[in-house]
């Protein structure tokens, strides 16, 4: 299946399905402006898939070279960016060199940013290997790194020429990482697709357990949803912010847990989406039943749906983190609220008191 991201002359396809890794060479070959490809991966993905990718590229007449970075979020920083650019230049990268990111969102964000600034911009292809990367980070052209001042604060919009989402690659992904990506899948249903949410209620548990057809369908629907939103608002001047559903609360929870393995991004987003629907209910905008329905589904697949117990969550500190997010403009937080599952919208006038009351109630386990 092919999903098109329509962005004028930067329009590109996302290919979704099994068996794409071994066809990467023939699919990338027509896009090549030179002979060489620089593959970037991490040290957990490379042993699994790098050789197959390079064999496929070589068979299509492309010369592959590779750089393997350490796996993990810490790699998205200035020192690793410098090391990567240095490796690319040492490999005699030219304007016609194709950069290929083989990995999750960390490899995709770092490699995409390197491709954006190397020689003022070279072509790149994303081969996302996590569910999160296939449904979210590889689509839309946001690239970048973290700094000591916060996550994703330095980066560029740089669209790939092609995305190959080989759903077979998800078979080796640890269950917790599958679930973290699944939270972003659920997000698309809650944003504006109630039928998809109902489909997930029926098929989500099988998807998480490894059902290949369910994974293909969910990746395709998710990519279509993100492609549509990005095509309408590439640089996030408006509606693209809907993709932050659950992320304002989620970001605060991640900041409070130090962006550590204690709470993965997708887990924080899962909790954050429930809080967004609860906030909507508290403001009289949505039925309380919708927040409960979302929480039930998250529970059913094994994602968290409430603030983890066994920790003293401080509402004031959480609100402070929400104000520290880069999405804050003129001192106001843009919330993604909803009239119900599948009917979300942006709001910039939520009173802090309502947010604090909700957080206090949630911290108390209610
Ligand atoms: P990740 O890249 O760290 O991957 C998670 C772990 O899974 C890593 O240890 C990785 O080595 C391993 N892994 C990857 N693929 C595997 C496979 N097929 N089998 C076995 N192990 C595998 O994390 P992620 O969740 O993919 O991405 C998170 C990053 O994405 C964050 O930095 C976040 O900021 C970014 N992000 C970017 C965007 C965007 O629009 N650019 C959107 C959402 C998230
Ligand atoms: Zn996210």
Image (tube, rainbow, N blue to C red):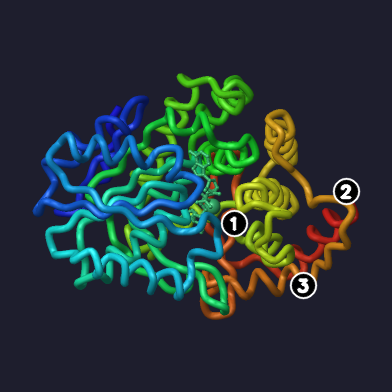
SS at mark 2 in the image: loop
* Drawn side of residue 35 relative to residue 161, left or right: left
* Drawn side of residue 344 relative to residue 120, left or right: right
Q: Which label sits on residue 366?
A: 2
| Foreground of the two, 232 or 76 | 76
Q: Nearer the viewer, mark 3 or mark 2?
A: 3
The answer to whether one can see residue 285 in this image is no
| Foreground of the two, 138 or 78 | 78
SS at mark 3 in the image: helix
Q: CA distance from mark 2 to mark 1?
A: 21 Å
Dot 1 and dot 3 residues touching (CB under 8 Å): no
Query: Against 14, is 308 above or below?
Result: below
Query: Against 64, is 109 above or below?
Result: below
Which residue corresponds to the image point at 74% horizontal and 34% vertical from the top-left? 299
Q: CA distance from mark 3 to mark 2?
A: 19 Å
The number of discs equals: 3
Instruction: Say few, some or many: other residues with alpha carbon within 10 Å of mark 1 (under 14 / 14 to 19 / 20 or more).
Output: many
- Mark positioned earlier in the residue sequence (1 or 3): 1
The answer to whether one can see residue 223 in this image is yes
Q: Nearer the viewer, mark 2 or mark 1?
A: 1
- Mark positioned earlier in the residue sequence (3 or 2): 3
Residue 50 image position (x, y, % from top left): 37, 42
Q: CA distance from mark 1 to mark 3?
A: 16 Å
Is the distance from the Cβ of mark 2 to the nearest ligand 2 atom less than 8 Å? Answer: no
Is the distance from the Cβ of mark 1 to the nearest ligand 2 atom less than 8 Å? Answer: yes
| Foreground of the two, 113 or 249 | 113
Q: Which label sits on residue 317?
A: 3
* Drawn side of residue 122 relative to residue 68, left or right: left
Residue 319 image position (x, y, % from top left): 72, 70
Q: Which label sits on residue 247?
A: 1
């Amino acid at each position: 299946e092919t999903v098109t991201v329509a962005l004028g002359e930067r329009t590109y396809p996302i290919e979704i399905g099994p068996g794409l890794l071994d066809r990467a060479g023939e699919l990338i070959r027509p896009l090549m402006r030179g002979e060489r490809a620089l593959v970037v991966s991490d040290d957990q993905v490379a042993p699994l898939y790098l050789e197959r990718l390079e064999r496929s590229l070589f068979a299509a007449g492309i010369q592959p070279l590779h750089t393997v970075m350490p796996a993990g979020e810490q790699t998205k920083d200035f020192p690793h960016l410098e090391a990567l650019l240095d490796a690319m230049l040492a490999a005699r990268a030219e304007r016609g060199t194709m950069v290929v990111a083989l990995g999750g969102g960390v490899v995709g964000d770092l490699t995409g940013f390197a491709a954006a600034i190397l020689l003022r911009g070279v072509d790149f292809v994303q081969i996302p290997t996590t569910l999160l990367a296939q449904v979210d980070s590889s689509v839309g052209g946001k690239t970048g790194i973290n700094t000591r001042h916060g996550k994703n604060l330095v980066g560029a919009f740089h669209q790939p020429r092609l995305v190959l989402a080989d759903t077979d690659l998800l078979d080796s992904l640890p269950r917790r990482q599958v679930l973290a990506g699944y939270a972003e899948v659920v997000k698309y249903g809650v944003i504006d697709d109630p039928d998809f949410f109902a489909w997930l209620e029926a098929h989500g548990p099988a998807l998480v357990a490894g059902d290949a057809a369910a994974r293909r369908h969910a990746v395709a629907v998710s990519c279509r949803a993100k492609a549509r939103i990005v095509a309408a608002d590439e640089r996030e001047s408006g509606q693209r912010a809907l993709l932050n559903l659950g992320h304002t609360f989620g970001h605060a929870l991640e900041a409070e847990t130090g962006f550590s393995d204690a709470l993965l991004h997708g887990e924080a987003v899962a909790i954050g989406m429930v809080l967004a629907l609860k906030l909507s209910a508290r403001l009289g905008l949505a039925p309380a039943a919708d927040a409960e329905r979302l929480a039930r589904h998250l529970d059913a697949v094994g994602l968290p749906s409430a603030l983890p117990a066994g920790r003293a969550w401080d509402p004031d500190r959480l609100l402070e983190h929400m104000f520290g997010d880069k999405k804050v403009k003129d001192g106001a937080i843009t919330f993604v609220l909803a009239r119900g599952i599948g009917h979300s919208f942006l709001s910039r006038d939520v009173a802090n008191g309502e947010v604090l009351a909700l957080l206090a109630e949630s911290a108390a386990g209610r």
